[in-house]
Amino acid sequence: MFVSSFHQDQKSFFGTVKYNAQQTNFYSNLQYELVYSQKHSLKTGISYRLLNLNEDIAFTDTSLQRTYAGNYKKIENIPGVFAENSMSFLNNKLTWIAGIRGDQHNQFGFTLTPRTLLKYDVTKQTVIRASIGTGWRTVNLFSENIGLLVSSRNIVFSEQLRPERATNFGINLTQKFESNNLSGYISADFYRTDFQNQIFPDYDTDPTKAIIKNFAGTSISNAFQTELYLKIWKRFEFKMGYNFLDVYREIDGTKQLLPFNPAHKVLTTYSYKPLTNKFHFDVNVHWYGEQRLPDTQSNPVEFQRPDFSQPYTLVNTQFTYIFKKVEVYTGCENTFDFRQKQPIISWQDPFGQYFDTSSVWGPTRGREIYVGIRFKLTNE
């Protein structure tokens, strides 16, 4: 049996927007496990989820004539049942996990969500995984998009929101390798998500509004990722990952990229640690490709922004020296001091009609140097 709960009470001001919220979450499940053969096992049980969310929004100034002030109360009671069956075949080289759960939402009724996973060990060092399943969730709009409250945009709900629903499938290939002086792995993943309903603020129709509505048309997320990890002479570690993300909707037959999703990202980490383990040195390099930004072309010229951001690189470094139970470290974040220039539209008039933070795509803080001490209370 598992039980968890938390309560949060938030009181905030975002300029002229007052936002107070109280949230209580409770989750519990009771699970039974049955091993009915050497190669098969079954997990089944019941669960219960409670969400009590009370959000209160008010304006200290009404000159912008925003309309979303009010009290937003949400209570969800979701009892559910679930079952998961694990099976092994071909001398444990093939594992098949099939699961299903059913949830009864107090407002949206009953939902069935199946999912299955296959794992095949081609060799001890080569593994293929594949999965497919469905999922759903309800959206907590303000807490999940808190940046909307900072902007002067009016938040417009054009209809009652339904749960987001999606089907996801993907495949992964992992190849490990090891020798006297070299070990590591290389992996590749591809995942696709097809949304049957999606909630994403519409920033483009009117740059003075964020329109919130259901989208039941074609909405796709394609994600490809590959990662290489090397450990050389037990001293050097190198990891490099590349991520390609294609997130779009089809509107009137035209492909429209969703904003704030860089199509290309590269993460590289380098580490050096001598065999004595007296110190280690780490470097992280992040490269972000361009990402689409909200359409601002109907704004006055001085409040317009490009349709796409520029690519940029962030470099972080850290050096750590170890004295038994004490570690001394120093480092530098954003080493080359890259910052997005004028990230906020109409920053000169924070309470004006065109003040907008939705075009922030890069770091706004420059180079930071830090020094620290870490104490270990027990021996490892």
Image (cartoon, rainbow, N blue to C red):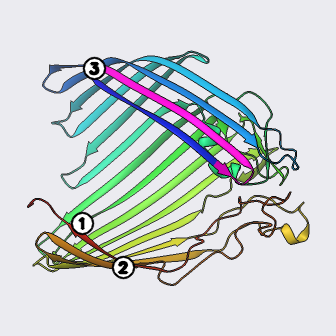
Residue 193, located in which quarter of the rendered image? Answer: top right
Quadrant housing the C terminus: bottom left
Nearer-the-camera pick, 73 or 179: 73
The answer to which of 357 and 377 lies nearer the viewer is 377
The N terminus - image quarter: top left
In-front residue for pair 306/302: 302
Residue found at x 49% / y 47%: 191
| Residue at horizontal 66 percent and vertical 49 percent from the top | 13
Question: Left or right: 190 with respect to 146?
Answer: left
Image location of residue 234, percent across then percent down: 15, 74
- Up/down of 290 relative to 151, above or below: below
Give yes or no for residue 282 being in the magenta stretch. Answer: no
Inspect the image, locate mark 2, and give the three-letter code of the amino acid beneath it.
Gly
User: In the rendered image, which residue does mark 1 sit on?
Assistant: 184
Using the image, tell me which numbered label, if any, was put on residue 331.
2
Point out the frontmost of discs 2 and 1. 2
Q: Which residue is mark 3?
A: 31
Q: Are marks 2 and 3 in contact (CB under 8 Å)?
A: no
Measured in 3D between alpha carbons, the distance from the residue under mark 2 to the one under mark 3, in whole angstroms, is 46 Å
**Which numbered marker is on residue 270?**
none
Q: What's under tag 3, amino acid-wise?
A: Gln
Q: What is the secondary structure assignment of the residue under circle 3?
A: strand
Per the rendered image, the range of residues in magenta is 13-31
Residue 232 in percent (x, y) is at: 20, 76
Q: Is label 2 in a helix, a strand or a loop? A: strand
